[in-house]
Amino acid sequence: MNSKDLARLIYPEFRFGKTSIEQGLELVRAGVGGFCFYGGTAEEVRHAAKTLKDAADHPLLIAADYEEGVGRRVQGMTELPSNMAVGAVAGIEEAENFAYNKGLVTAQETVSLGADWVFAPVLDLAVNADNPIVSLRSFGSDPERVSRLAEAYCKGLTDGGALNSLKHFPGHGRTNTDSHLALPELDADEELIRETDMYPFINVLPYADSIMAGHLLAKPLDADYPASLSKKVITGIIRREMGFDKTVITDALNMHALNRWGEPGIMALDAGADILLYPADPFTLINALEKGLKDGVITEERISGALQRQKQLIEHSGKIKQAAKNTRRSNCLIPAGEFNARIAAQSVAVTSGLDHLSRGSCAAYVEPGRTWENREGRAFTSALENCGIRLVPYEKVKSGELREIDSGAIEYLVAAAFTGPQAFSGKINLSTEQKAELAEAFPEFKRVYMVSFGSPFALQGIEPAPQVSVCAYGKLPQFQQQAAAIITGKARPGGIDPTFLK
């Protein structure tokens, strides 16, 4: 057992704009098993993947967090709707079809870049409005529905030739903390955790290539260690109870949730994890693994088992890529604009009220925390104007510069909130200051139309409440255009709120 055998268990980050090809090649020479890619253009990713793989004396796996399509991370590729948008499609069979095609397109583009592995789907339940890191990444709150959509998505990934990973076991949805910043705690009743949070993992298990253990302290399952470092969770539950004998990977080991454990990679490996993802310093971890083996903290049997599972994963990757190549599936819903528009038409939902803005109406427009000039909703405001709505910046109304126009008083307000999970931010919904801005603005108008281009949770806690609330589950242009069409009566709302389903 040499240092390269130990390095094979490590998958460092490769962050375009930060990590150089030379640094990547140094890690390849050290023996790492693969990389997790972040960012880049399509050409940069293709070049890096080929260069690193060609230089390796063993098969490398290239992974990435392409949860919302490759275009969310890679310039020049396709960005797809959020999982919650898919979950908001009312008909379950239609939603499954969209989930499958989302997985298929993601896999096809992943493989076209020379990558192999998509760290998705997220199986966390959207059951906590204050959760700062799940939200749109979840298919919803109903474990059965989440299971069906995740299964369809996994089938799409497989048919497109990409590996999948169910995350973040045993379920991150009930926590209040971003694990990038601190350790989240899941202190719910054990029966509830097993019957709801763990339910999708158990049901989708037959379609899983790997499971990602989350950095969360699920106290009823292990009161001392987070799931990613817990022998009770990984070996006891995932391996023995669930019977999963494929690859288990950690979430990124550089996250602050694990700060108190020093070098957590040793504990994760001993607990039963096979791949140690994104350590703060890969070379430090290699040295620590060598020392751990020498000192008897970790065993050769444990390392051999992890290497064997990784070998099986690599072989499976080759098989599904070849099958995808032989089948040559094509997605009839591409181009992406049409695919995204079809999901938008069936997912954008009205959560309260349904009065329309009629053609010729004048409305002020506000995005809390932003001005008209730096607004995110340019596709939204353009669509409203194309529907015959005259828009004026709210800041001009507030300053007194513009209280009425030639057609009379400005009676309506359109407010848009752009929120979503952002790693290391620790927040997801509207801030106290943004809510205060809306609370000041709303009473000035006869009717307020509020749109969340994020989760429905962003619409909660706003007082006074808007007369009309719409949720679009994301900010892709097609979703902004659909929201405008619904507000102006040009389209009927087709979606539901998947966070209310039980």
Image (cartoon, helix red, strand yellow):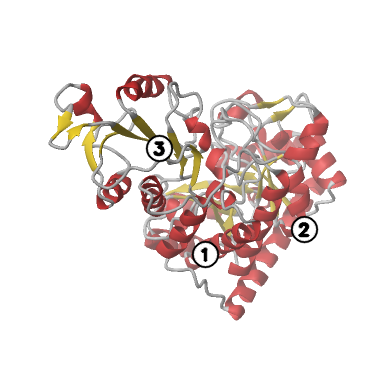
SS at mark 2? helix
Q: Position of residue 148 (x, y in %)?
A: 69, 54
Neighbourhood count class around disc 1 (C-alpha, 10 Å): few under 14, some 14–19, many 20 upward = many
Q: Residue at x 31, y 27 (%)?
A: 445
Three-letter code, disc 3: Phe
Location of residue 396 by image quarter: top left
Q: Nearer the observer, disc 1 or disc 3?
A: 3
SS at mark 1? helix
Gap in angstroms between the C-alphas marked 3 and 2: 36 Å
Gap in angstroms between the C-alphas marked 1 and 3: 26 Å
Question: Mark 1 or mark 3: which comes first in sequence?
Answer: 1
Q: Residue at x 57, y 30 (%)?
A: 129
Location of residue 375 by image quarter: top left
Query: Nearest the camera: 78 or 472?
Result: 472
311 shown above or below 455? below
Location of residue 164 by image quarter: bottom right
Residue receiving disc 3: 418
Q: Position of residue 328 (x, y in %)?
A: 56, 78
Q: Is residue 58 visible?
A: no
Do residues under tags 1 and 3 come within 8 Å of each other at their CB atoms? no
The circle drawn on residue 105 is 1
489 on left or right of 191: left
Q: Position of residue 329 (x, y in %)?
A: 57, 75
196 on left or right of 391: right
Three-letter code, disc 1: Val
Three-letter code, disc 2: Pro
